[in-house]
Image (cartoon, rainbow, N blue to C red):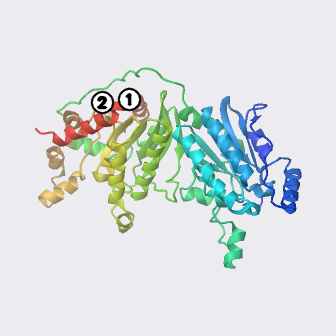
């Protein structure tokens, strides 16, 4: 923790985050276990010191007018430790938030479970975790703001289960407290490991933000996670069910490789709202993929987008990218949001690290989860679509393609090298393998094409706006598919593609 970082108590945090005079407490007087006179005295002293009756405060309030349930730790009460009474209070609050269909904001700051109460306090983490699980099963948002310090059983339960997890700058965050580590191992824990900033770098949390920025961030998140109901189907923008057959696919391949061609980052920047998330949440972050909560028009979604590397010859999509993609798939299912996958890749990373990281297995698991995804889904062919990296994000209810996109088991040069022992016949192989959009439409894979009568690289902003409008329309069409028929319809689509003949 930086020496300049000041610990914010629970009352101050609620004043910062909630709309004025909107907080309503849900707390009753806690029933503390009668363990000893010393413990009773410690509880009385903690109450006087913190001006609270327990280590957590629960209730509901409004953030930018949106009603939200809150659970906030008070570190000044016995280091925010969670005993039986605190655990019961947390569980009751989560259950009430679930019953009232409220999003839940948790702000832990705790040394973990309460040592004075031993194993029974420790076991309280199980019931808290179960309550969080049930809240998420109800497709209700669970947002976590990790504060200094959060360690032990709190970090290992309700502190690490957020759909979105952000942290206070400079906060100490980790499983094992530094003092415990030093006492057990007679050496100091390395500096800089258990900090908000390091957790962000490692892909464990989504952002590091001061409390003053929380209201804006939560408002943005909830505008996507809990949108106003949209009825009916969005009218499809101008486009074509297929493109002119006279266009040479090799021209599309070359245009798709233009470094000025719009990419996933530019598409998200053109959306009505995009809130980037960070990493797998399990200690990995790969630059080959972007994950964001997004709204195209009035259609909210989770976006998983492949991000082209700076150097076109570099294939940067590794196994960590696909694990991050699977985090996005899980978010879409838990939050009952449509999933949009954006395909634009030169292929998967070919390296010792990728092989040892289980790349092939990650591709297989991604395919399996997309085929069985309960949420509506749309896949977007934006540019290059090479190999297993492209296939891993392809299965969806609806598929949309930019006119100059393509899909192939290998880049045409690779196919030429295998068949003809030279890369000189790449253009011929591109035509022979039917990798372009006209053929993808003919196969029945692509449902809608966004025209590029003028190359997207020449008019990137306008193209992104047109593509965003098309995505919104495809999301609405995917949402219109009855849930009872969704998986069977998706399965049949790809079964027919597999059985397609001339």
Q: Residue at x 36, y 44 (%)?
A: 370
Q: Quadrant of residue 57?
A: top right
Q: Residue at x 49, y 43 (%)?
A: 331
Q: Earlier in the sequence, mark 2 or mark 1?
A: 2
Q: Is residue 204 left or right of residue 451?
A: right
> Whole-percent x and y of residue 23?
76, 34
> Whole-percent x and y of residue 231?
46, 21
Residue lying at the far bottom of the rendered structure = 186
Is residue 308 visible to the viewer in this orientation of the structure?
A: yes
Q: Quadrant of residue 110?
A: bottom right
Residue position marked by numbered label 1 in the rendering: 470
Distance from Cα at disc 2 to Cα at disc 1 = 8 Å
| Looking at the image, residue 262 lies above or below residue 282 | above
Q: Secondary structure at mark 2?
A: strand
Residue position marked by numbered label 2 in the rendering: 448
Q: Residue at x 57, y 32 (%)?
A: 223
| Looking at the image, residue 155 lies above or below residue 271 | below
Q: Residue at x 71, y 75 (%)?
A: 183
Q: Residues within 10 Å of mark 2 (few under 14, many from 20)?
A: many
Q: Is residue 19 left or right of residue 422?
A: right
Residue lying at the far left of the rendered structure = 502
Q: Is residue 135 left or right of residue 152?
A: left
Q: Quadrant of residue 248?
A: top left
Q: Secondary structure at mark 1?
A: helix
Q: Residues within 10 Å of mark 1 (few under 14, many from 20)?
A: many
Q: Looking at the image, do the residues carrying marks 2 and 1 touch, with CB atoms under 8 Å apart?
A: yes
> Whole-percent x and y of residue 269?
49, 38
Between 423 and 325, the one nearer to me in the picture: 325
Is residue 346 visible to the viewer in this orientation of the structure?
A: no
The C terminus lies in which quarter of the figure?
top left
Q: Which mark is residue 78?
A: none
């Amino acid at each position: 923790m930086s020496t300049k970082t000041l610990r914010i108590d629970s009352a101050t945090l609620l004043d910062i985050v909630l709309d004025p005079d909107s907080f309503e407490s849900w707390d009753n007087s806690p029933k503390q276990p009668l363990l000893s006179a010393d413990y009773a005295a410690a509880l009385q002293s903690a109450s006087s010191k913190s001006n609270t009756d327990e280590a957590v405060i629960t209730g509901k309030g409004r953030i930018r007018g949106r009603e939200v349930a809150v659970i906030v730790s008070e570190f000044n009460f016995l280091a925010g430790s969670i005993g039986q009474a605190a655990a019961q209070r947390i569980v009751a609050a989560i259950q009430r938030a679930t019953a009232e269909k409220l999003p839940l904001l948790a702000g832990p700051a705790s040394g973990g479970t309460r040592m004075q109460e031993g194993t029974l306090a420790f076991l309280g983490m199980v019931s808290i975790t179960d309550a969080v699980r049930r809240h998420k099963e109800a497709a209700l948002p669970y947002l976590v703001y990790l504060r200094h310090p959060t360690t032990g059983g709190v970090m290992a339960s309700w502190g690490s289960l957020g759909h979105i997890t952000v942290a206070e700058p400079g906060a100490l965050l980790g499983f094992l407290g530094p003092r415990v580590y030093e006492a057990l191992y007679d050496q100091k824990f390395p500096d800089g490991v258990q900090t908000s900033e390091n957790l962000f770098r490692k892909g464990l949390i989504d952002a590091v933000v001061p409390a003053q920025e929380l209201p804006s961030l939560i408002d943005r998140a909830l505008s996507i996670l809990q949108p106003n109901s949209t009825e009916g189907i969005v009218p499809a923008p101008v486009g074509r069910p297929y493109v002119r057959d006279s266009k040479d696919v090799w021209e599309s391949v070359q245009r798709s490789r233009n470094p000025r061609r719009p990419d996933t980052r530019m598409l998200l920047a053109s959306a009505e709202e995009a809130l980037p998330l960070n990493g797998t949440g399990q200690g990995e972050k790969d630059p080959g993929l972007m994950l964001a909560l997004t709204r195209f028009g009035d259609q909210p979604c989770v976006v998983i987008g492949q991000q082209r590397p700076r150097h076109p010859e570099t294939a940067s999509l590794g196994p960590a990218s696909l694990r991050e993609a699977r985090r996005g798939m899980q978010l879409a299912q838990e939050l009952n949001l449509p999933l949009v996958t954006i395909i634009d890749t030169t292929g998967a990373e070919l390296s010792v690290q990728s092989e040892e990281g289980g790349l092939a297995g990650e591709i297989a698991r991604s395919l399996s989860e997309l085929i069985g995804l309960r949420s509506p889904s749309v896949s977007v062919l934006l540019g290059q679509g090479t190999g297993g990296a492209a296939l891993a994000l392809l299965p969806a209810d609806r598929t949309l393609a930019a006119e100059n996109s393509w899909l192939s088991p290998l880049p045409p040069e690779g196919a030429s090298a295998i068949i003809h022992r030279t890369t000189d016949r790449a253009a011929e192989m591109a035509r022979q393998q039917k990798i372009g959009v006209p053929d993808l439409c003919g196969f029945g894979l692509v449902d809608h094409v966004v025209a590029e009568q003028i190359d997207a690289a020449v008019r990137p902003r306008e193209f992104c706006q047109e593509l965003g409008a098309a995505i919104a329309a495809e999301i609405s069409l995917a949402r219109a598919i009855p849930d009872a028929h969704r998986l069977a319809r998706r399965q049949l689509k790809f079964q027919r593609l597999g059985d397609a003949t001339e």
